[in-house]
Image (cartoon, rainbow, N blue to C red):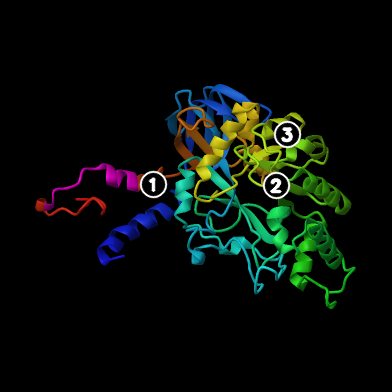
Amino acid sequence: MNRLAMLFALPLACALAAPAASAQDVLIRNATVHTATERGTLQGTDVLVQGGRIAAIGSGLAAGSAQVVDAGGQPLTPALFGGITGIGIEEVSGEASTRDASLALGENAKDMTVRPEFDVTLAYNPESILLPVARVEGIGFTLLTAGSTAGGSIIGGQGAVVRLDGSPDPAGPKLLFVSLGAGASNLSGSSRAGQWMLLDQMVDEARGRLSGDSGFALLTPAGRATLKRYLDGDGRIVVEIDRAADIRQLLRWSRRHSLKIAISGGAEAWKLASELAAADVPVFVDPLVNLPGNFDRLGATLENAARLRAAGVQVGFTQSGDASHNARKVRQLAGNAVANGLPWEDGLAGLTRVPAQAFGVGDRLGTIAVGRSADLVLWTGDPLDVAHTARQVWLGGRAIPMRSRQTELRDRYLRAEPAAEAGALPRAYPARVE
């Protein structure tokens, strides 16, 4: 980058990365309020925000000194969860130095090095350019994933929910990530059976039934302590898995060890819907995974979310590919699930209340209720319809600047090319501010 480009790029980057202004008192008047609670949708309703929290919900509320925003009947929802992503720990997918979502300490693909204590939140960059790109689309949160990779293990490590408002620290408790099935078989001796054998051994180590001094031990002392915490019920384990037969084994394994689990993927989860509901296991699906892309997804269907929900499963959403750079598409996924039988209210809950409760922040986030954090989005229309956009986003009561790298590029290249003879810079550079 030359010096002139840096001169313009640095203020832009700082402006986009900086946290929004401080919390403000605001009255959002006459909105269609989708609470994502048992109260459902409230027509022509006001929401009063004070001190970063929702102070009142009702009709004809007094504004006092609060700023008034006329919603004009448009939808108001909780800020959305962007699924399970690497936002803030993956800047450029093709550049290894900007990716921090997985650990590979083994020398090659056959060396399984297990470190459940690996914590991706320590690498989180709240100034990532991906944050404003996501939040202007109504995305307020994401669950950072710790992925399994060659040289690592089927236990990827730990992640947590982060707020996309520039806050540097996680917004909730840690979760442990595990990858099972064909996609992770190269990490477990090329056999699904090996995955359960290895997991049971690690449970034995964490429970002290296999000494850490044993030549067969897989875990470090820190790893044993980390895994024991989840075995003791302090935290949920998110398992990436698709095939129904594997999910059946997962349910048996989690029941045997009394674990709290959630499923990510679950292309064939609908086949075990009643068992998942009985075990109270939330499932985060990609509704557009509807083709037999591999042998673990032969039973994939567009109706996966609808069938799971009909059986009583709590259904959320996540993307199967490039989720970090396309978090905005998660509401399209919810819309597709609704188009294939999922009730609309459940589609919204899958973007708000369900992930908040599953990831340990449901007491503060994911719903519109008095006392909850004022994380809100005012939409131009149906938030599950990509023809509509976020009109304004508030996170913790702070109005988020509705600008991102994309909007800056849009504005730069939509303007006419300046005449060279006038001495103006080409539009590859931002317009000068006189």
Which region is colored magenta? Answer: 409-420
The total of numbered circles placed on residues is: 3
Q: Residues within 10 Å of mark 3 (few under 14, many from 20)?
A: many
- Helix, strand or loop under label 3: helix
Asked if residue 57 lies in the magenta stretch, the reply is no
Residue, far left: 421
Whether 351 is drawn above or below 153: the answer is above
Q: Amino acid at mark 3?
A: Leu
Cα distance in 3D space between marks 3 and 1: 36 Å
Horizontally, residue 2 falls left or right of residue 76, namely left
* Residue indicated by mark 1: 406
* Residue indicated by mark 2: 295
Horizontally, residue 361 falls left or right of residue 9, namely right
> Residue 157, position in %: x, y?
68, 61
* Residue indicated by mark 3: 308
Identify which residue is drawn at 51% across, 65% down: 96
| Res. 194 image quadrant | bottom right
